[in-house]
Image: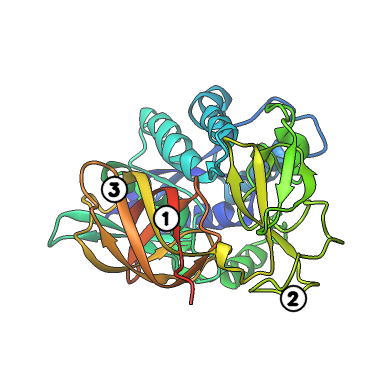
Amino acid sequence: MQSAKKRVVVGLSGGVDSAVSAYLLKRQGYEVVGIFMKNWEDDDDSEYCSSNIDFVDAAAVADVLGIEIEHVNFASDYKDRVFAEFLREYQAGRTPNPDILCNAEIKFKAFLDHAFARGADFIATGHYARVRRNPASGKVELLKGLDPSKDQSYFLHRLSQAQLDRVLFPVGELHKSEVRRIADEIGLPNAKKKDSTGICFIGERPFREFLNRYISKEPGPIKDASGRTIGQHVGLSFYTLGQRQGLGIGGIKAKGAQKGGGEHAPWFVARKDMAKNTLWVVQGHDHPWLQSAALTALDASWVSGTPPVDGSLAAKTRYRQSDAACAVQGADASGAFTLTFTEPQWAVTPGQSAVLYDGEVCLGGGIIASASPWPST
């Protein structure tokens, strides 16, 4: 590739990963232009929203690297394509992952379209993932990032082949420590900036406080596995399976001997009954109600270009989870498939994504609709 003739528009977030990505591309001879994406503006003057600070940091990076930067507002697209779906899912009692939808609809769609309108040949971001173009199949493969602790392929599994073919992930070949070292070495102003956490419109604010602005509360009973009412929840939308904090029942002991935890073991959200507005909790991390043997997923999207055939693969049912061996069945044009696991999976959560892997290659995945319990012994 004659990189000197190729124009790359880099999404500069204000963080160190995208900053080093821009530096690496410029060093490789690309013509590099930066874009800062503003995706949320409802309360960007609050203590929780850092978009103004992030833009200052991104602009400072662009200045050091000697590249131009453009500030683009995608807030309207974000609200229509991502946030509206986020609220619908929570109101239905599920736990969505808006970062995945944001990647598919904003960062690699609205941003990509904008970049190409500006004459870009590629776009680039600071994601820890890799792209491999397979000349034999003619397809583009999404690979895990080389740093296993930072791999973000899970969040990118809904990209299409067309999107993936126009993307570069420069830091996907590096470990985070190396990215920090490069940033410090070349004097980037954000070399030691703390990594962002959570989704952009929530930031560091209390999640329940944020959600309460958009979803009405409907309190109801909290029950344990024996059917005993042990508290009251503030609304099922405000809880997720596997949740331990914020239940307000810490001092209550389980009735009788509970398998999977002693009488002082912590409580976890295990089930949500939307029809009866009941939150079911269990005591102990290893309680049977928290262990699943299989799941059904819907709305599948295959970044690999085609659904996998029935057989043995690996899957993640949440980010940062280790790959879990599984058998996939029924992945076809219908968008639904099932996974059966060889080991129990903890707190499989409707609304989250089940993402499939063949070794280091991410194939795609779907939205978890339901899970089957691990058989009792």
Q: Please, what secondary structure does the residue beneath circle 1 have?
A: strand
Q: Which residue is mark 3?
A: 165
- Mark 3 belongs to which amino acid? Asp
Q: CA distance from mark 3 to mark 1?
A: 23 Å
Q: Determine the residue located farthest toward the left in the rendered image.
A: 136
Query: Could you say which quadrant of the image residue 68 lies in?
Result: top right
Q: Which mark is residue 262?
A: 2
Where 39 falls versus 368 (above or below)?
above
Q: Position of residue 18 (x, y in %)?
A: 55, 52
Q: Which mark is residue 354?
A: 1
Q: Name which of mark 3 and mark 1 comes first in the sequence.
A: 3
Q: Please, what secondary structure does the residue beneath circle 3 have?
A: loop
- Mark 2 belongs to which amino acid? Gly
Residue appearing at x 82%, y 55% in the figure? 249
Q: Position of residue 34 (x, y in %)?
A: 52, 41
Q: Please, what secondary structure does the residue beneath circle 2 have?
A: loop
